[in-house]
Amino acid sequence: MNHAITRQLGAVWLTCAALILSHGTAKAAAKKHPAKVTLLRVPHKGIQPQVALDSKGVVHLIYFQGDPAGGNIFYVRSRDGHIFSRPLRVNSKAGSAIAIGNIRGAHLAVGKNSRIHVAWMGSNKEEPKGSVKPTPMLYTRLNDDGTAFEPQRNVIRSAVGLDGGGSVAADRMGNVYVAWHAPEPDKKGEANRCVWVAVSTNEGKTFAREKRANAEPTGSCGCCGMRAFADRGGKVYILYRSATEQVHRDMFLLTSVKKARRFRGVDLHPWKVETCPMSSAAFAEGPAGVLAAWETQGQVYYTRVDPKPSPPVQAPGHSRGRKHPVVAANAKGETILVWTEGMGWNRGGSLAWQVFDKSGKPTREKGHADGVPTWSLVAVFPRPHGGFTVVY
């Protein structure tokens, strides 16, 4: 072999070695400094993800599969936010969950000893064909061994008329709260809808009869979703959309007083519109307190609600059709607001996000991605060392 060929082969080898070393260094750097925001598809092609973290940082996730008019809810968990456990079916009666309308699906809460609690609006398949029984607000919890969910139960006793779905919250002391909105008994119409809460003081073993939570005669938007949440100290929050005079569809916040025996109401954000926007809302807890997110007139907002509501922060830009916001905060005090765009009745869309600094100012971390399925939602959780994972 002559010296020219030897020099050429040596140069090729050095180039390859440099590329391998560069690739390894890039991988190491990416691992050391991961992207601020990463995207994660719902396991097993599910829709309507709902996510919560426990005190140890374990990610708990539920999602919907099957016929949107009558499908099933599944639960998985993950220690690293990437690899999830084998799914467990949440609903004990097949086909008893609903996904139509985006906002009527299941909600998730982590309670005492990281027990999982789930509540959802029952489908027509929950009752025998031809039944005229009212739509149930169903609840279940993970059993003591963490291996299966207990048989589902309807917590509604008298406040019938469920339409826009309900929610569930749980605290570290063993209290569980299932909330929904429905008319007062023997009354009809959005103006007579109220927020109802059924309370359990024994980790969901039994529930007391539901009681009205909102003292204000605000009514409630019939087809809008709502959200309940309990913070680390046991305070309970509820977000719902009013329907005063059927045009004042403001976002209302209820905050518990005296261990949820009474609630105090605050009008967070006005919106005058005659039609139901079929909106949803979200809560999260971060280093600075409890955050709430909602939609008003095609725009999405978030605010800190503890100890009292601060001025709303809106997502930058003016893109109409922003819906279904979720929010999260990481250990650094950064906040992410995630929402959908282009979603509609029986139509999928896209997702977008914006990260804010401690003062609530937008950072350069923002993005957009296509592929949110029909009837679905988005979810988000903070990662242990900073950054966020968006589930869609």
Image (cartoon, rainbow, N blue to C red):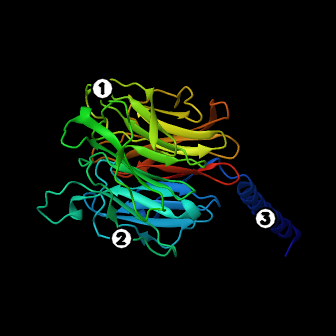
Q: Nearer the viewer, residue 131 or 236?
A: 236
Mark 1 or mark 2, which has the lower sequence index? 2
Residue type at numbered disc 3:
Val
Mark 3 or mark 1, which has the lower sequence index? 3
Secondary structure beneath label 3: helix
Q: Nearer the viewer, residue 174 or 21?
A: 174
388 up-or-down from 140: above or below? above
Mark 3 or mark 2, which has the lower sequence index? 3
Residue 151 marker: 2
Residue 12 marker: 3
Residue 2 marker: none
**Residue at screen point 54% across, 33% down:** 303
**Residue at screen point 58% across, 36% down:** 306
Q: CA distance from mark 3 to mark 2?
A: 66 Å
Q: Nearer the viewer, residue 347 or 300?
A: 300
Classed neighbour count for the residue bearing mark 3: other residues with Cα under 10 Å, few (<14), some (14–19), many (≥20): few
Residue 304 seen from this side: yes
Q: Nearer the viewer, residue 382 or 33?
A: 382
Question: Position of 345 compared to 225: left or right?
Answer: left
Specify the quadrant that holds the N terminus: bottom right
Secondary structure beneath label 1: loop
Residue type at numbered disc 2:
Pro
Residue 105 image position (x, y, % from top left) = 35, 53
Disc 1 target residue: 273
**Residue at screen point 37% across, 33% down:** 215
Q: CA distance from mark 3 to mark 1?
A: 69 Å
Question: Position of 72 compared to 174: left or right?
Answer: left
Residue 228 image position (x, y, % from top left) = 45, 46
Residue 138, picture quadrant:
bottom left
Residue 340 image position (x, y, % from top left) = 43, 42
